[in-house]
Image: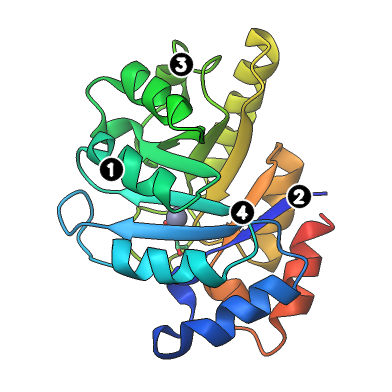
Amino acid sequence: MQIVSPSLLAANFANLEKDIEMINNSNADWLHLDVMDGVFVPNISFGFPVLQAVAKICRKPLDVHLMIVKPEKFVKEVAALGAMMMNVHYEACLHLNRVIHEIHEAGMKAGVTLNPSTPVCLLEDVIRDVDMVLLMTVNPGFGGQKFIEHSLDKVEQLRQMIVRTGSKALIEVDGGVNKTTAVQLAQAGTDVLVAGSYVFGAENPYERIDYLKNL
Ligand code: DX5
Ligand code: ZN
């Protein structure tokens, strides 16, 4: 069984209410929300006014993925949404240990995210403190990109580190998750699958969510 966190980035932004109702009525576990600033990644998605509107009507726990510089500036704002998980990028935090503690103090679970080019071994000194590691399986910034195969090795390496250190961290993957890659990822040892276009691009998104859940 996998935890499934559909990414709203691939939803219809002209009618978010309809897509959030679909998520509410589905077997999805969480809703994944991608915030981009045009600096950390070469794209801009949505910010707090949209997140607040989404949080009001979404009945699933919010899994917030900040692709922004200095994410520590927004811990309070993310907590005020009632978010369950705040994911910050390893590459965006100079003082990651402090940020993780601030996220916990604000009452949220803390996730640390790695870009495809950032090695898993760099997590050695934070792995016991985080609730989740989000491995990017594409370069962040856009939906609908091709899965990077080397990610499967990273999932295995991370699983080994978690077992060795006794960490309770979940392994989440994000980018290029589809019918085929989801099977490979689950076999490699993931706990949480994020899927944007695979879910929202489907004629029957409920079926696709169930498929991912049952891997
Ligand atoms: C990309 C985002 C993803 C994105 C995934 O930077 O972090 O969450 O929505 O999109 P798909 O599943 O279409 O690759
Ligand atoms: Zn994401």
Callouts 1 and 3 close, C-beta under 8 Å: no
Residue 61's tag is: 4
**Considering the numbered disc 1 on the image, is that residue within a helix, a strand or a loop?**
helix
Amino acid on which the number 4 mark rests in the picture: Pro
Amino acid on which the number 2 mark rests in the picture: Gln
Closer to viewer: mark 1 or mark 3: 1
The residue that mark 2 highlights is 2
Number of marks in the rendered image = 4
The residue that mark 3 highlights is 126
Q: CA distance from mark 4 to mark 3?
A: 24 Å
Amino acid on which the number 3 mark rests in the picture: Val
Q: CA distance from mark 4 to mark 2?
A: 15 Å
Q: CA distance from mark 2 to mark 3?
A: 24 Å
The residue under the point 33% across, 38% down is 75
Q: Relative to the observer, which residue lies in front, 112 or 198?
A: 112
Q: Is residue 48 rendered to the left or right of residue 177?
A: left
Task: Find residue 14 and report its horizontal and vertical position in percent.
Answer: 40, 90
Q: Earlier in the sequence, mark 1 or mark 4?
A: 4
